Image (spheres, helix red, strand yellow):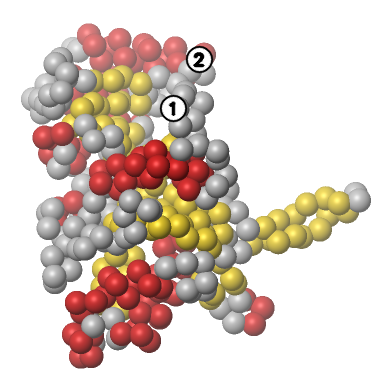
Amino acid sequence: MRKNQNQYMAKFSHYYLQYDLNDLFAQEYKAKRQEIFGEMLENDKSISFILGEGENLKHYKHTVRHLRINHNIIVMRIANDSKKEVIQDFKKMSVRHEPPCYVIIDNRDHCRRVAIQRNREAWASTGSVAHVMKEVLDQAMRRNCHIGIDMRPQFYPKDFYKAWRLHEHHTSGLRFALTDREVPEDFSSELQTDDSIMGFALKVNEESLRKKYKTELVLSPAQDNTPLLVDQDSVYIRNLVRFHAMTGAPIVIETSDGARFTCFIGNEEDSAKIKTSEMEEGFLDTLFGEAKDDVAMAEEKVMEFVNGIKYVVNDNEQHENGAEEDAA
């Protein structure tokens, strides 16, 4: 598959699995918990995502693919069970509507990452997808082996600099998206010193709003194949971060392994944002036969994406990369 500018980038929210081993009988199955979990998602018929009763019963259809290069990387499509109003023969009627989104699960040893596609045409939120999957998988796991399961969102640190430090050794670029809203009038008074570059950015932002352009500032290292270092004492950086805190525009951290982490620097109420990464949706379509492209290449791209967002725990389900990543 050849990447082009028109390729749609699917955005995924970061979740992670957590096994509940508190049941007395869970210890008997502890060593095989991931194997049992994987068997539930072995194929399209190994589990049914059904919730509710009577008129409220919903059946969320799904399809499953395992990467041939690593069977423990699971790619799913899970469809919402909803209704949609359409017009037929000049009459309004309600029809069944089952739009899907992608879910990628890393079930390698000690890995717990779940990436859920943000697709509001299909689901109201990634939390809705996580809820359906968690409820069904938790019930099935408890019946089979007395082990519970939870699917939790992973949040960005409230502090942008803390977020960057988590990736500082392989950060390849920072993208400061300019806002599509008016800049608060008091922003200029918030600038820490006279900063000609920031002044230029504000003028670009004003012109972008007027002409309806999408504009961003990109910072990259001066030398190739070296990490981008962020100077926290730089007036330029501090003003850019303050700009994004006041406007709600995102900052994207790009890493050398191809991952993209979208960071929102909001106020106390808005700062608990779920981590996100992006990949070309066409690679996922290829796995399900909806695009005539190289399946091997598509699998390599999915593997690259999963490796860039790994979430690793120890035997006691404790995250090994630092609890500060999950602070909400």
Which class describes the residues within 10 Å of circle 1: few (<14), some (14-19), or many (20+)? few
At 23% from the left edge and 83% from the top edge, which residue is drawn? Answer: 29
The residue carrying mark 1 is 3
At 37% from the left edge and 49% from the top edge, which residue is drawn? Answer: 13
At 28% from the left edge and 34% from the top edge, which residue is drawn? Answer: 258
The residue carrying mark 2 is 210
25 vs 45: above or below: below
> Helix or strand or loop: what does disc 2 sit on?
helix
311 vs 22: above or below: above
> Helix or strand or loop: what does disc 1 sit on?
loop
Q: Amino acid at mark 1?
A: Lys
Query: Position of 103 compared to 71: left or right?
Result: right
Whole-percent x, y for residue 323 in the image: 14, 57
- Mark 2 or mark 1, which is nearer the start of the sequence? 1
Of 321 and 197, the residue lying toward us: 321
Q: Nearer the viewer, mark 1 or mark 2?
A: 1
Looking at the image, can residue 149 be seen? no
Most distant residue in the right direction: 89
